[in-house]
Image (cartoon, grey):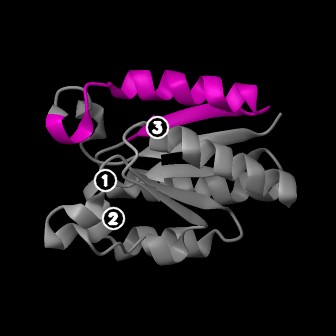
Amino acid sequence: MPAILLLNGPNLNLLGTREPGVYGATTLADVEAQCREVAQRLGFTLEAFQSNHEGALIDRLHEAGQRFKTGELAGVVFNPGAYTHTSIALFDAISGVKPLPVIEVHISNVHAREAFRHHSYISPAAAGVVVGFGTDGYRLAIEGLAAKARAA
């Protein structure tokens, strides 16, 4: 059974306590448990990783690219957090591991927030983007990734 990698970037370890009016009361552990259930229902396992460090996220993407080639991994669901708006290095990492499908996820509607959040360096390299559905966006991303995997 192939895996789906759930990657979360900086400050997402603070879910449930950081700006609950924007991000809700659901914790990262809750998100991971919900994603694991959805993945299993769809015939996948789920691996979760969160880091506040850009290089650690890049390393995981590189590993994911290799695992995709061997059929171990179906793809990545990735909430890059604030790195979305700043990281050309993450764009390059995602571009460098194609055809690995990476689905970009954001809990809030970044387009309805501060102007600096309106641009994503990640979106042009992503296979899809889910924005503004709260933590349900992770479920939508997994379902979309599963559909892409079955179609491939």
Residue 45 is one of the magenta-drawn residues: yes
Q: Amino acid type of disc 1?
A: Gly
CA distance separating discs 1 and 3: 16 Å
**Residue at 14% across, 65% down:** 114
Q: Is residue 86 visible?
A: no
CB contact under 8 Å: marks 1 and 2: yes
- Of callouts 3 and 2, which one flags the residue occurring earlier in the amino acid sequence? 2
Q: Which mark is residue 136?
A: 3
Please tell me whether residue 123 is drawn above or below residue 2 in the rendered image: below
Q: Which residues are magenta?
A: 21-50
Q: Amino acid type of disc 3?
A: Asp
CA distance separating discs 1 and 2: 6 Å
- SS for tag 2? helix
Q: Nearer the viewer, mark 1 or mark 3?
A: 3
Identify which residue, 46 or 139, lies in the foreground.
139
Residue 128 percent coordinates (x, y): 57, 64
Q: Quadrant of the C terminus?
A: bottom right
Identify which residue, 96 or 13, lies in the foreground.
13
**Residue at 25% across, 58% down:** 82
Q: Which residue is mark 1?
A: 81
Q: Quadrant of residue 62?
A: bottom right
Q: Which mark is residue 54?
A: none
Q: Which residue is mark 2?
A: 84
Left or right of residue 58, residue 20 in this image: left
Q: Nearer the viewer, mark 3 or mark 2?
A: 3
**Residue at 75% across, 57% down:** 148
